Amino acid sequence: MPNPKPEATPAKNVLGTALKPCSQKPLTGFFRDGCCNTDEHDHGVHTVCVEMTAEFLAYSKAAGNDLSTPRPEFAFPGLKPLDHWCLCAARWVEANEDGKAPRVVLESTHERTLDYVTLAVLKGSTIPG
């Protein structure tokens, strides 16, 4: 389990402004702080704040990452459509290439996501924050 310590400097989103929370219910983020914060220990780069869809949840499950089944042993409630969640950047890119990516909340998506995908591509799949 990651050490829940905040970044030394305030995190920024892909728009260059302060990173806004993604979700408190369910509690998301690598640090389970409700934000898509990251650091060098976050090898999955959980930085993309998305709104889950049934289509994406089925896609992810078929790819071997079941996000819809509750896992109480990990304090994971299981996700359902409309839940917001900090998704791995590489998984979002893969889903986008396959036409299955959930929509993105730019204000809550960490700037590190731009190491994986351009802002223009993200803007093509957004919802208001």
Image (cartoon, grey):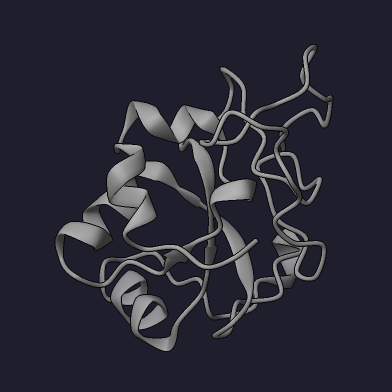
Residue at x 67% of width, y 35% of height? 37
The one of 94 and 67 positioned closer to us in this rendering = 94
Left or right, residue 84 beside residue 92: right
Residue 30, by quadrant, is top right
Above or below — where is 21 with respect to 74? above
- Which x, y percent locates residue 63? 26, 67
Above or below — where is 70 with respect to 63? below
Left or right, residue 18 beside residue 70: right
User: Quadrant of the image for the N terminus?
Assistant: top right
Residue 43 visible somewhere in the drawing: no
Residue 80, by quadrant, is bottom right
Residue at x 42% of width, y 87% of height? 54
Considering every residue shown, the one lying at the far top of the view is: 8
Residue 121 visible somewhere in the drawing: yes
Residue at x 29% of width, y 76% of height? 59
- Which x, y percent locates residue 57? 41, 78
Considering every residue shown, the one lying at the far left of the view is: 98
Above or below — where is 40 with respect to 120? above
Above or below — where is 13 with respect to 32? above
User: Quadrant of the image for the C terminus?
Assistant: bottom right
- Which x, y percent locates residue 72? 74, 71
Residue 42, by quadrant, is top right
Count numbered badges in the picture: 0
- Which x, y percent locates residue 102? 40, 69
Left or right, residue 103 beside residue 38: left
